[in-house]
Image: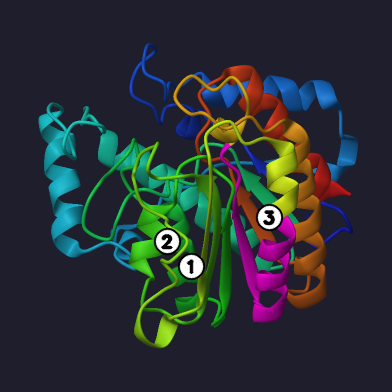
Amino acid sequence: MTEKEKGSVFVYKGEELARYGFGDHHPFGPDRHDAFHRELAEADLGDAVRYASPRHATVDELALFHSPDYIDFVSKKSSEGKGFLDGGDTPAFPGVFDIASDVVGTTLAAVDAVMEGQAERAFVPIAGLHHAGRGHAAGFCVFNDCGVAAEYLRSKHGLKRIAYVDIDAHHGDGVFYGFEDDPDLIFADIHEDGRYLYPGTGAANETGKGRASGTKLNVPLPPGAGDTEFDDVWPKVLSYVDEAKPEFIIMQCGADSLDGDPITHLRFTENTHARAATDLRKLADKHCNGRMIGTGGGGYNRQNLARAWTRVVQAFAE
């Protein structure tokens, strides 16, 4: 594909992505990739969807967001293949460094595909690892592909103003604190109130620091909130992003905000993900020459994530 086709969406697929997980009995298991791709295939979106292959991130690319000491730490734990990368949520296992680097590299491949005109939009299902900080792992997240992608858009593609929009049930703390004092990273996050759910952050009064004060929007919702409550607050997010006039949008599409997820308490349906993707696509068309990517994020009910992410891809393809 040498020229961008209207409505074309790259969707990334491959064993390199599927193997990011922590075992068959872990909530973040390797079967999440195939659960989504089976649902997407049944949706039969035809030529609107083009499958693309994962790629590996280099150490220099990881270092756009992560500290050298942390990268070295993950490499060492990957060789040891035991213990944890954090306080107990994110296990180390043999090869975890390379596997996590594949997630980052694939998100960067999605960025390149959109920026270079190969596709209008792109979606990476096993990505959106928003808890990893610049110097630490957290919450099943080894490297923060979204954070790296924001820095990559600046260093390689010369953009400045990036919008990150997150509808995962968990607050995207790794992105938030990684860019808390950065006025050009526009952050908007709807999530379950941190008083009830990991990581315990994302209060409405967290709006950025210093020059970045007011460039971050956190919208916590109470446990049990569903589509109605989302619909009440979503216009505020859209207005916030619209006024910021970003050059590129990164959407984190966590499906653990859907009713029936085993570790969260929100009650969205996949209609919320479809609405969010559609509305953000329109803002990308307005401000970004259509440029945006979606990353899967969380979601531990396989049927939920398959349906929600498929609706995101459908919205991207419209």
Residue at 44 percent of width and 24 percent of height? 263
Q: Is residue 172 left or right of residue 143?
A: right
Q: Is residue 262 above or below residue 94?
A: above
Q: Amino acid at mark 1?
A: Ala
Q: Is residue 50 left or right of residue 294?
A: right
Judging depth in this view, the residue of 195 and 85 nearest the camera is: 195
Residue at 78 percent of width and 74 percent of height? 289
- Read off the magenta span: 234-254
Residue at 66 percent of width and 25 percent of height? 306
Q: Look at discs 2 and 3 and give the one toward the viewer.
A: 3
| Residue 106: % across, % down | 51, 48
Label 1 crowding class (10 Å Cα cut-off): few <14, some 14-19, many 20+? Answer: many
Determine whether label 2 and label 1 are within 8 Å by CB. Answer: yes
Q: Look at discs 1 and 3 and give the one toward the viewer.
A: 3
| Residue 223: % across, % down | 52, 34
Q: Looking at the figure, which quarter contains the N terminus?
A: bottom right
Determine whether label 1 and label 3 are within 8 Å by CB. Answer: no
Judging depth in this view, the residue of 63 and 278 nearest the camera is: 278
Instruction: Examine the rendering and report whether any part of residue 268 can be seen.
Output: yes
Membership of 128 in magenta stretch: no
Marks 1 and 3 sit apart, C-alpha to C-alpha, by: 25 Å
Give the colouring mode of the picture. rainbow
Residue at 42 percent of width and 50 percent of height? 130
Residue at the disc numbered 3: 233
Task: Check residue 150 in the rendering and tell me which mark sits there, or answer none.
Answer: 1
Kindly state the secondary structure of the residue where label 2 is placed.
Answer: helix
Q: Amino acid at mark 2?
A: Gly
Kindly state the secondary structure of the residue where label 1 is placed.
Answer: helix
Membership of 241 in magenta stretch: yes
